[in-house]
Image (cartoon, grey):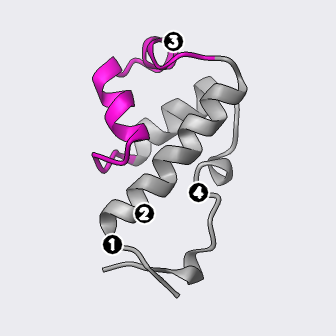
Amino acid sequence: MIKAGKSKLLTLVGSNIREQRKAQGLTQQQLAYESGLELSQVNRIELGKINTSVLQIAKICKVLDINPDKIFNFNIDEVEIE
């Protein structure tokens, strides 16, 4: 089992968002604008620096036209949440 505190879990989610954004050829600035979030907020989400809300994740998924399972693409059984 991977011991992952909150920061590791946030990093996993953030890196999945970044991967999906880049796959669509969007910049962080474009994602921020289209989702109604601040550029700095998108940057901090992707870096796993902040624990964002479900509402913000939904906005990001809508802009990226993906289901949330793409963002939460990891085996929760392998992550120990503190």
Q: CA distance from mark 1 to mark 4?
A: 16 Å
Q: Is residue 47 magenta?
A: yes
Which dot marks residue 9?
Answer: 2
Cα–Cα span, label 3 and label 2: 25 Å
Asked if labels 4 and 1 touch by Cβ distance under 8 angstroms, the answer is no
Q: Is residue 28 above or below residue 19?
A: above
Q: Is residue 29 magenta?
A: yes
Quarter of the image with the C terminus is bottom left
Depicted 78 relative to depicted 36: above or below: below
Residue identifier under label 4: 72
Q: Are marks 1 and 2 in contact (CB under 8 Å)?
A: yes
* Residue at which label 1 appears: 5
Q: Residue at x 58, y 46 (%)?
A: 16
Specify start and end residues of the magenta stretch as a single range.
26-53
* Residue 30, label in figure: 3
Earlier in the chain: of badge 1 and badge 3, it is: 1
Q: Secondary structure at mark 2?
A: helix
Q: Give the mark, 3 or 4, whose residue is nearer the N terminus.
A: 3
Q: Which of pointers 3 and 2 lies earlier in the amino acid sequence?
A: 2
Q: Amino acid at mark 2?
A: Leu
**Residue 62 at what x, y percent from top left?**
61, 29
Determine contact: label 4, label 2, CB under 8 Å. Answer: no
Q: Secondary structure at mark 4?
A: loop
